[in-house]
């Protein structure tokens, strides 16, 4: 089972940037997909981006395209989410998750990391 710990959140003014990190441990990630999700107050959790650990192919939600970049560091078993041109509507708790390619995401969620963007 993969254990995930998110970090890097904070308070930022609109237009600024933040980089989130998700450190994974517990097993090799070969063949896994890593993803970022977010949940704003009063809203459902939503998909942000995902990346294939093996080949680095990434997919993004429409709101993330052009502003967010997901990447991985194989040596350190860490996934990053670089967020640029932040907007107040990006305010949310951000979570990472993992799962074998082609399988559902893990039902286990970590604590997440809070991102707050002021206008």
Image (cartoon, rainbow, N blue to C red):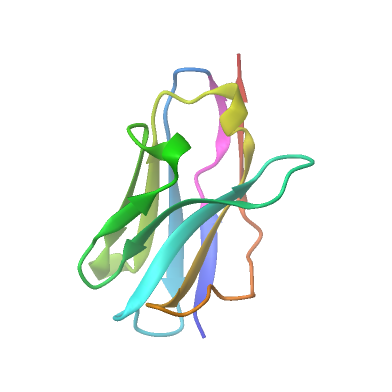
Residue at image position (62%, 54%) is: 112
Q: Is residue 116 above or below residue 93?
A: above
The rendered magenta stretch, by its main secondary structure, is classed as strand
Q: Is residue 106 above or below residue 51?
A: below
Say if the magenta span includes residue 30: no
Quadrant of the snapshot with the C terminus = top right
Q: How many marks?
A: 0
Residue at image position (32%, 32%) is: 66
Residue located farthest toward the left when viewing the structure as drawn: 55
Q: Indicate left or right for 32 with 43 as reference.
A: left
Residue located farthest toward the top when viewing the structure as drawn: 119
Q: Which residues are magenta?
A: 7-13
Residue at image position (55%, 41%) is: 9
Q: Is residue 88 above or below residue 32?
A: above
Residue at image position (34%, 53%) is: 59
> Can you give x and y, in whole percent of width and height, for residue 69 in the image?
33, 43
Q: Is residue 32 above or below residue 119?
A: below
In the image, 78 versus 99, the foreground residue is 99
> Can you give x and y, in whole percent of width and height, for residue 96 in the image?
52, 60
In the image, 76 versus 53, the foreground residue is 53
> Can you give x and y, in whole percent of width and height, for residue 104 in the image?
52, 76
> Can you give x and y, in whole percent of width and height, for residue 48 in the image?
48, 48
Q: Indicate left or right for 58 with 96 as reference.
A: left
Say if the magenta span includes residue 12: yes
């Amino acid at each position: 089972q993969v254990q995930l710990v998110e970090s890097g959140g904070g308070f930022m003014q609109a237009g600024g940037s933040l980089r989130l990190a998700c450190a994974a441990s517990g097993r090799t990630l070969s063949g896994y997909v890593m993803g970022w999700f977010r949940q704003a107050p009063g809203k459902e959790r939503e998909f942000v981006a995902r990346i294939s650990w093996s080949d680095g192919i990434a997919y993004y939600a429409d709101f993330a395209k052009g502003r967010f970049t997901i990447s991985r560091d194989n040596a350190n078993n860490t996934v990053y989410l670089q967020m640029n041109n932040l907007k107040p509507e990006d305010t949310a708790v951000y979570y990472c998750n993992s799962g074998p390619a082609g399988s559902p995401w893990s039902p286990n969620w970590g604590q997440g990391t809070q991102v707050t963007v002021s206008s």
